[in-house]
Image (tube, rainbow, N blue to C red):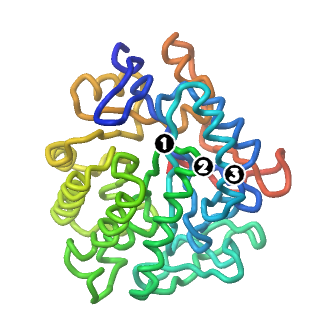
Amino acid sequence: MKKLFTPFEKGTLKLKNHLVMAPMTRSRAIGNLPNEMMVSYYSQRTGAGLIITEGTAPSPEGLGYPRVPGIYSQSQVEGWKLVTDAVHKNGSKIFLQLMHTGRISHLSNLPSESKPVGASDIRASGEIFTDDHGMQPYSVPEALALEDITKLIENFVRASKNAIRAGFDGVEIHAASGYLFEQFLNPNVNTRDDQYGGSIINRSRLIVDIVKAIADAIGPEKIGIRFSPLSRMGDQKPYGESEVNQTYTYLSSEMNQIGIAYIHLSTNPDIPEKTYRIIRAVFDHTIIYCNGLNADSAEKVLQNNEADLVAFGRGFLANPDFVNRLKKNIPLDDLGDNIICISKESDNSKYSRDNKTE
């Protein structure tokens, strides 16, 4: 366990160890506002060198799930300041994950003036929890017009500036898990015939445009991005290993040219080794691996230089003192099959939805 617990430095990213707390949706933000419960949650887990927050909406139409925090209002900025202050006191860094769920949404989870949007008007199969009506089929999204995409980019830039004002060390763009940006990447979901649809370059354009705009606003060294090649989350039907490989080769190369801080890979057994290798080859900065790791396999990943940092989700969720337990070889508590979050009505009521690593 030598490398896990040693300080990390690459580029401008300097951390007290090689351990990252993965982003996990908690649905605890009543009124979409960060609160004292969230301050306690994050401050308890500052054994991590880097904490990546739960997915946070850059604008009201990006909320998707019930009780997801936002970063588009002054009151949200003030609420997040309490979180970042608590985390920094214990020597950890914290990035805000910006998450727009796109078509993985329901009208009941959005403010009255907002509606679900997507790359195209194709409804995702499956259901989503709503506080008002329980489980409901996903709503049909409205395809984003070009002027809507311009506004979307502006919203992400504004949200990123707000994150820095709130004391975050940077932002992570959530381009994984079947949410909006991955919806643009997937030709089974993106049926557009404009500059944001068709070829790999066109389907990747929204991600590249947004990252460039944010980099101009807050600096590329304050940006990370999360990818999940060959993920099936959010009704993402596979579109061919070769094309997926080309897509993430292109995106990783573009991210390298922009100079962002890191790529956060949500790993899964379907990703071929060549995809990992080529991302590592074309991206010079920090790479984070997440999912399915334990202390031994994480150390091996670091020792073999497959990744620079390793992220854990469920381990941190069940064990606020996760890092200390790893150091001292103390058995970990197990969440089992269900992960409990706080519902709208009561701290002791049943879960609204499973909260898997985002």
Residues under numbered marks 2 and 3 in contact, where contact means CB atoms less than 8 Å apart: yes
- Cα distance, mark 3 to mark 1? 16 Å
Label 1 belongs to which residue? 169
Residues under numbered marks 2 and 1 in contact, where contact means CB atoms less than 8 Å apart: no
70 versus 189 height, above or below: above
Left or right, 352 with respect to 22, comes to right
Q: Which three-letter amino acid code belongs to the residue tagged 1? A: Asp
Residue shown at the point (52%, 83%) measured from the top left: 141
Residue shown at the point (62%, 71%) measured from the top left: 60
Label 2 belongs to which residue? 166
User: In terms of image quadrants, where is residue 213?
Assistant: bottom left
Neighbour class for label 2 at 10 Å: few (<14), some, many (≥20)? many
233 versus 195 height, above or below: above
Q: How many marks?
A: 3
- Secondary element at image label 1: loop
User: In terms of image quadrants, where is residue 116?
Assistant: bottom right
Residue shown at the point (62%, 75%) measured from the top left: 106
- Secondary element at image label 3: helix
Q: Which three-letter amino acid code belongs to the residue tagged 2? A: Ala
Question: Which circle's residue, 3 or 1, is located before the other in the chain?
Answer: 3
89 versus 344 height, above or below: above
Label 3 belongs to which residue? 78
- Cα distance, mark 2 to mark 1? 9 Å
